[in-house]
Amino acid sequence: MMEVYYAAIEELEDEALAQRLLLKLPKDRRERILRCHKQVDMQRSLAAWTLFYYGWERLSHVKEAPVLGYNAHGKPYVEGNPWYFNLSHAGNYAVAAFADAPVGVDIEQMGRAKAAVAKRFFTEEEQEMLAGSLDEPEEWQRRFAWIWTRKESYIKAVGEGMRIPLDSFCVLLDGDKEGYCYQSIPVPEGFYTSVCCQKKEPLNVAEVKLCDI
């Protein structure tokens, strides 16, 4: 089973709530968040990591904060635990994904994509898929977000980030020869979220109210 939690960042405009959630985080994580130069970046980071610790406690049934390690490319993982996780944020939402195999997640707000980006980063097959909706702007944006979030979720699942050129692999199928599988959902409204995992698992998606944590 894969678990995906998402939350609205705008809740953190309530300063009392933001301070309460900051104090629930481990000191080193709290200090990293407070080093963000912009308030919106701090809110996004706080929301994403709050979802991580929320999901960690629910899935591991352990209240103590886990020890995090980082791979050579900076991807965090939980040391000595079978649960893998990944975080993402876009616009006013943050998302956290958990699985018992390498996982990546990406969320994208629809309506802001440009054709030049698709031409630069998408394969020919993916560009052809987009071309089929040139006369339907909303559908074009939806298809772009579907492709983009799959690509981002894959490179995050593999753990190598932008070392993998985005136009070097195609995401039109739900899986590849390496065993990585995609699941994409138009959630929340106005956004698209994709999860990539090294094995096919049922996907459970839930909205979390930060004020209830």
Image (spheres, grey):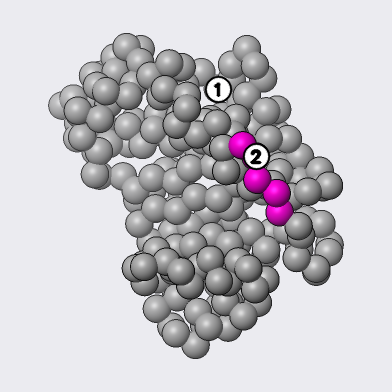
Please report the bounds of the magenta region as a residue range: 68-72
Q: Residues within 10 Å of mark 2 (few under 14, many from 20)?
A: few
Image quadrant where residue 141 sits: top left
User: Which residue is painted at 49% across and 62% down in the image?
Assistant: 45
x and y percentages locating residue 123 in the rendered image: 35, 15
Number of marks in picture: 2
Residue indicated by mark 1: 174
Classify mark 2: helix, strand or loop: loop
What's the residue type where badge 1 is placed?
Asp
Residue indicated by mark 2: 71
User: Which residue is painted at 47% across and 24% down in the image?
Assistant: 164
Q: State which quarter of the image contains the N terminus.
A: top right
Q: Viewed as shown, does residue 99 lie left or right of 159?
A: right
x and y percentages locating residue 200 in the rendered image: 69, 28
Q: Decide which of 138, 21 is in the foreground and name it.
A: 21
Which numbered disc covers residue 155? none
Q: CA distance from mark 2 to mark 1?
A: 26 Å
Q: Decide which of 185, 12 is in the foreground and name it.
A: 12
Q: Viewed as shown, does residue 145 lie left or right of 115?
A: right
Q: Main secondary structure of the magenta part?
A: strand
Judge whether residue 8 can be spotted in this image: no
User: Which residue is painted at 20% across and 35% down in the image?
Assistant: 114
